[in-house]
Amino acid sequence: MMYSFEELKSIFLDYIREQKLTNEPVNLYNPVNYLMELKGKRIRPVACLLVANIFTEDIKKALPIAYSIEMFHNFTLMHDDIMDDADLRRAEPTVHIKYNINTAILSGDLMMIMSYKHILNCCTDLVLKDKLLKLFTDTAIEVCEGQQYDMDFENKKEVSLSDYLLMIKLKTAVLLAGTFKAGALIGGASDKDAAHFYNLGLNLGLAFQIQDDLLDTFGDQDIFGKKIGGDIIQNKKTYLYLKALELADSNQKAKLISLYNDNLMKKDDKIAEVKAIFKDLKIKDHAENLIEELMGNAFEHYHALSVPEEKLKEVKNLMNYLLKRNI
Amino acid sequence: MMYSFEELKSIFLDYIREQKLTNEPVNLYNPVNYLMELKGKRIRPVACLLVANIFTEDIKKALPIAYSIEMFHNFTLMHDDIMDDADLRRAEPTVHIKYNINTAILSGDLMMIMSYKHILNCCTDLVLKDKLLKLFTDTAIEVCEGQQYDMDFENKKEVSLSDYLLMIKLKTAVLLAGTFKAGALIGGASDKDAAHFYNLGLNLGLAFQIQDDLLDTFGDQDIFGKKIGGDIIQNKKTYLYLKALELADSNQKAKLISLYNDNLMKKDDKIAEVKAIFKDLKIKDHAENLIEELMGNAFEHYHALSVPEEKLKEVKNLMNYLLKRNI
């Protein structure tokens, strides 16, 4: 049978509860439980299960992989939150705030290692396991590279749009790509279908990230759920900003750079002035066009799958769900 | 042919140079090169090669495993040095001092992942690889547990001797045990011989750590290479201190605890007074007896190996080298 996203999420949440760690020392293991149990959308693990379910009815065998991916993702959150000096994660205190920095470093390390442990225990087919481990490892290395580029960009004067696209590919998109591919592989897909799922996830992940940039500036606060303009206040080199710099004439460019160097002006004024430049340059249209192009790529891979379309309903729903948020 | 420790070290150092990372972003990869290239004794990787060499002439195939272990060890150093607020490592600035904390977190994460990558690329025998990956993962988890216990003990009032022995087992000894076992496995040893090497390494690692405690207080500064008494000044709950608490009468116990709570008295006086209590309680003898017992265990496993004794010469040399340092 084919499960819905909600059904798979519920199966996955049960699995998380079963996996709760009671090992010692508790100061090492409790922060892992804390972060893993925070309410989240669980997009990645459920996407993994959902893709596996296209190729197999036995969804249980995909659970350790889904869990491993969620644990890896949470490991990156635990460490990124230290690096980004973030106090809140999913509206709750981050681990280094609730506990301390050393705990967040060490429990994060443990999560990284445990995500390998779950793959190592996922199946008896050693060829499949080797494939999954290599996929996981290559992806994890890329995620570290993406985080480093992201940190580098904060202090770098000249960041190009292609630098930025490489960064979000590594930091965000490859993990979604790897998730889709891992789900396909554990479900029993051919290497060809697994590769299509990788590229589907990659383009979807890029589109999602560009959309996130767009929503942060042009979104509806009630729907977006965050205060609008946060990226501008933080002088973040987003797609919008970098595209604007690319298209701006020398006056607009100077103005934009000076706004991004001004941390004293009233927040609302800063947001309004930056947005005005974005509007003059039709940055919203450019972003929407890019998102459309990326989703077009994603759907090319979707249509190239050797799978009957009716089995892909939930994947299509997920793709549309991730990109549906109104701006 | 059987290589000597020095020959294997030289082979390993060449391999490190070959593996030097030139990937981007450089801010992520340079700290890895920096730490991996610092002068060190390279005990673990060379021990791995040396044990592999007992079972195979083809030492090359053990290099990725030896390298993986050294990289894992350096990952733990990179993160432990943040947690311990250490400025120097092998007489050079630690990574978080030379670069910054975020870099030390992220490059450490990368090293952890890369140590898996090297195992994944080590061989085509998937059964062997699976065994090595599981050994590596279980060991890595234990090392995290050991580091957490070590941090916990700093703030814990009551630490027992058996707590302490568990901590050093996890923090230090299991990695040496895993190193010996991994070398045996990649060399082609039977599971039985591999298990003996594990236990040999475990006992050797424990003995080494107890000896380290002993040397820190009773060593000859010229031979030990560090200032004597550092553990006492830092109020470290070492074997010596915990054994003394166990054996002390109520007066000695009160005196020892009060000395360990006094951070204002003259360093030399504090060292002398603590040492006087240790001497009254014959702590040095107790430590030496324990080391002897542990080395006895190690040699039981050594003698149980199904390997002609002449092939074990270098292992015996290494065991004696690690424990030879005069006190």
Image (spheres, coloured by chain):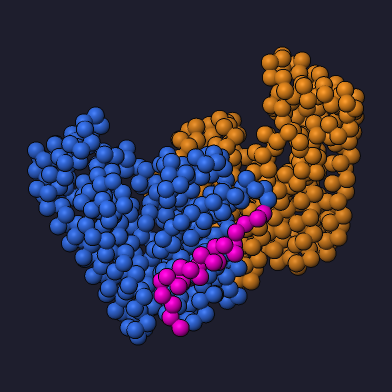
Chain colours: A blue, B orange
* Residue B213 can be seen in this image: yes
Q: In the rendered image, which quarter is residue B227 located in?
A: top right
Q: Nearer the viewer, residue B132 or B67?
A: B132
Residue at 31% from the left image edge and 49% from the top image edge: A226
Give coordinates of residue A265: x percent, y percent.
Answer: 21, 31
| Residue A205, placed above or below residue B72 | below
Queried whether the magenta region covers residue A69, the answer comes back as: no
**In the displayed image of the protein, which residue is found farthest to the front?**
A222
Task: Name the residue located 56 percent from the left edge and 30 percent from the top edge.
Answer: B87
Q: Residue at x 15, y 52 (%)?
A: A283
Magenta stretch in the rendered image: A1-23
Q: Is residue A133 left or right of residue A309?
A: right
Question: In the depicted view, which residue is nearer to us: B97 or B303?
Answer: B97
* Relative side of A275 to A168, left or right: left
Residue drawn at 22 percent across, 48 percent down: A217
Which quadrant holds residue B194? bottom right
**Total of numbered circles in the picture?**
0
Q: Is B63 positioned to the left or the right of B240 in the image?
A: left
The question of residue A5 being in magenta is answered with yes
Q: Quadrant of the C terminus of chain A?
A: bottom left
Q: Position of residue B302 (x, y in %)?
A: 83, 55
Q: Nearer the viewer, residue A204 or B11?
A: A204
Q: Find residue B249 and report its image quarter.
A: top right
Residue A237 position, x and y percent, is 26, 45
- x, y percentage for residue A1? 46, 83
- What type of secondary structure mainly makes up the magenta span? helix
Is residue B37 visible in the rendered structure shown here? no
